[in-house]
Image (cartoon, helix red, strand yellow):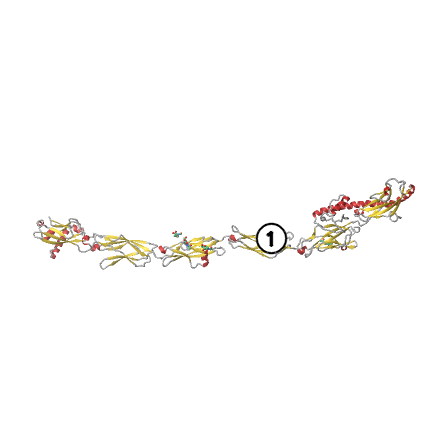
Amino acid sequence: MVSRWSSPEAWCLLLSLLLLASWERGSGQLRYSVPEEAKHGTFVGRIAQDLGLELEELVPRLFRVASKDCGDLLEVNLQNGILFVNSRIDREELCGRSTECSIHLEVIVDRPLQVFHVEVEVKDINDNPPMFSVREQKLSVPESRLLDSRFPLEGASDADVGENAMLTYKLSPNEFFILDIIHKKDKDKFPGLVLRKLLDREENPQLKLLLTATDGGKPEFTGSVSLLILVLDANDNAPIFDRPVYEVKMYENQVNQTLVIKLNASDADEGINKEMMYSFSSLVPPLVRRKFQINESTGEIKVNDAIDFEDINTYEIHVDATDKGNPPMVGHCTVLVELLDENDNSPKVVVTSLSLPVKEDALVGTVIALISVSDQDSGANGQITCSLTPHVPFKLVSTYKNYYSLVLDSVLDRESVSSFELVVTAQDGGSPSLWATASVSVEVADVNDNAPTFSQPEYTVFIKENNPPGCHIFTVSAWDADAQENALVSYSLVERRVGERALSSYVSVHAESGKVYALQPLDHEELELLQFQVSARDAGMPPLGSNVTLQVFVLDENDNAPELLAPRAGSTGGAVTELVSRSVGTGHVVAKVRAVDADSGYNAWLSYELQLTAGSARSPFRVGLYTGEISTTRALDENDSPRQRLLVLVKDHGEPALTATATVLVSLVESNQALKVSSRALVNTMGPEVALVDVNVYLIIAICAVSSLLVLTLLLYTALRCSAPQTEGACGPGKPGLVCSSAVGSWSNSQQRRQRVCSGEGPPKTDLMAFSPSVPP
Ligand SMILES: *[C@@H]1O[C@H](CO)[C@@H](O)[C@H](O)[C@H]1NC(C)=O
Ligand SMILES: *[C@@H]1O[C@H](CO)[C@@H](O)[C@H](O)[C@H]1NC(C)=O
Ligand SMILES: *[C@@H]1O[C@H](CO)[C@@H](O)[C@H](O)[C@H]1NC(C)=O
Ligand SMILES: *[C@@H]1O[C@H](CO)[C@@H](O)[C@H](O)[C@H]1NC(C)=O
């Protein structure tokens, strides 16, 4: 149009047409039209000409144009009578949205006054684009809306009219919505959206679309609005755990409230639909609920009770995460808790005794007890090693896995060790390892494998002769290392003959006590040594026995007085008559007293002395103390009585000493007479004299021998006493005493010593038994 308006020929044509038309209507009214927004000076019409006025008369007739409400939008050039646009005409301002819009002009001329009405129609041009009231439209759409749901939009408006205001809408391409135009009765249109594809907030929480409106003008104008579609959440997502199964390994015996795992589920929804609560699923048995607790809000699973590997070693916990949407949705997962073993159980040892007590002759390899060990832990913590007290004659033999036999490993001897306290230790392989012990008392039963034994193979006993019958002379004692009846010793005599008689007529042994009794008085002169054996037997099956030798020395007592020997035939009444020549010199042996003693030793050792009678002070004789020889002490003279009677006291050395008195009659004769007699006497006396001397020599040798034997014996006994146990013995007439002398230097010494010791200083302390002949009061 604009292009057409711009050409003058077109304008002329249009104007003439318009004029013709207006005139033709005959209303006497002039009509022009002008497009809005025309420039200043734009030709509207030859108003003067068209009104039939001459150009010259315009001024004189005071030609003027008046408009009620439009001011000076249009002006007339009085020179050429042309109506033109004076200032910008906006149709929309002038008439709004009404389709008809015109400016009414009153043209007045004076002389004569004439009034003309001129209508100037203002034509619309497309000068207004479609307009939306807001720059952005927000639309909230729940994601759960169904397909074909409609959402009205606010349309655009166009200030223009007609074609210029005819709007068409267009939506930016998208997959979810299409545009739907609703036509109203007044030809107006409303745009709306229709859902063509389901929304997912989790994928597209919002959409940005552009709605464009285009008018029908030429050229066309467009206007647009952006549509912000907010997708509202619906609880369409269940909480989801990262993994369907969580595996947790933890040691048993965790302290209360130890964290097992912190679960974390996520929910794609938002808001309350995303908030969730954790809980054990209904599948979880009460036992597991007791052992573990779950924090609803944090998803932390904690230990709530003692958890023991030996009780249950894996737990399967089904956990639900429930969101707070409506309806709620639930996610699931499973927590597998695998407990790891700790060495918290000590091994157990059970001993089953089989054969106790064990006989000491049991064979090596004999099974004594069965031992079973166990440990509730697993792996190394349950691996048990078993050990036994070291250095015992037993060993453990593994029979099967955790079963052992306690077996005899070497021979036993009850007499050395009668019982064993065995300790079986079971230790597991944990670290630190735990252990347990069990003790087994093994008693060793006795077997009769030991014979009774005496401390010495031989005992020497000294007993004084003339003991009272039935006197206790010694006690034998044998010891048996075995036990009970195997150690019950009984004694008996080993019978033999002593000369004509049986041994049992001399001595007897008490079977239980071992006391040896002399059954009858013993006579040293008859039997000096009684040697016999005592047998000791235990009561085992079979019994064992051993023998001991007793040597009983019968000690001499002074029970025999010296006995005078008849010097020659013819002597009577024990009186001997000797003829002695008066001429013999000093030291001449005139006679010899001979005596013997049946006893021995001291008791048989004789001494001689002259018993003094009245007037014997002058006696020229003396007696050899040990020889019994009567000899002169000086030369005889006339004063000596021709007949002299000498009493010689023969005394042994016993205690008390026994004596005999020999009477020797000495007749002093003249020398020749005496010679004969004495020679005869000498001849006669020669034999017996020599014999007597011999007897005395032998006696002394015997005494010496016996003494040295005694000394030796004493020494030997003292030595033995120091090593051998004491054996007792007491017997004898009167008050028996015991001699414990060790060193007897000489006879006299011995004598004194014996006296002293036997007078009883303290208890008897020696094996050697002797009898003190006389105890001083
Ligand atoms: C839970 O998981 C989500 C996503 O995996 C993460 O963003 C969040 O930080 C986690 N929360 C915790 C407490 O671990
Ligand atoms: C769960 O954990 C929270 C945060 O630690 C705590 O405040 C709440 O007391 C716990 N709930 C239970 C039942 O233990
Ligand atoms: C462990 O702790 C919880 C909370 O303090 C308590 O309820 C439960 O009785 C405890 N369990 C044991 C075995 O002490
Ligand atoms: C003991 O002596 C008797 C008789 O001489 C003999 O039969 C026996 O075998 C002896 N016992 C022992 C153990 O020597």
Which residue position holds label 1? 421
| Residue 582 in the image, given as x and y percentages of width and height | 90, 41
Q: Nearer the viewer, residue 485 or 131?
A: 485
| Residue 319 in the image, given as x and y percentages of width and height | 42, 57
Q: Secondary structure at mark 1?
A: strand
| Residue 347 in the image, given as x and y percentages of width and height | 54, 54
Amino acid type, label 1: Glu
Q: Residue at x 78, y 45 (%)?
A: 705
Q: Nearer the viewer, residue 343 or 716?
A: 716
On the question of residue 82 being in view, the answer is yes
Residue 760 horizontal side relative to residue 252, left or right:
right
Residue 354 horizontal side relative to residue 283, left or right:
right
Residue 229 horizontal side relative to residue 771, left or right:
left
Q: Quadrant of residue 683?
A: top right
Q: Quadrant of residue 139?
A: bottom left
Taking the view exactly as shown, the residue that stands out farthest to the front is 614
| Residue 123 in the image, given as x and y percentages of width and height | 17, 53
On the question of residue 270 being in view, the answer is no
| Dot 1 crowding, Cα within 10 Å, few <14, some 14–19, many 20+ | few
Q: Residue at x 60, y 53 (%)?
A: 421
Does the beta carbon at disc 1 come under 8 Å from ligand 4?
Answer: no
Q: Nearer the viewer, residue 667 or 358?
A: 667
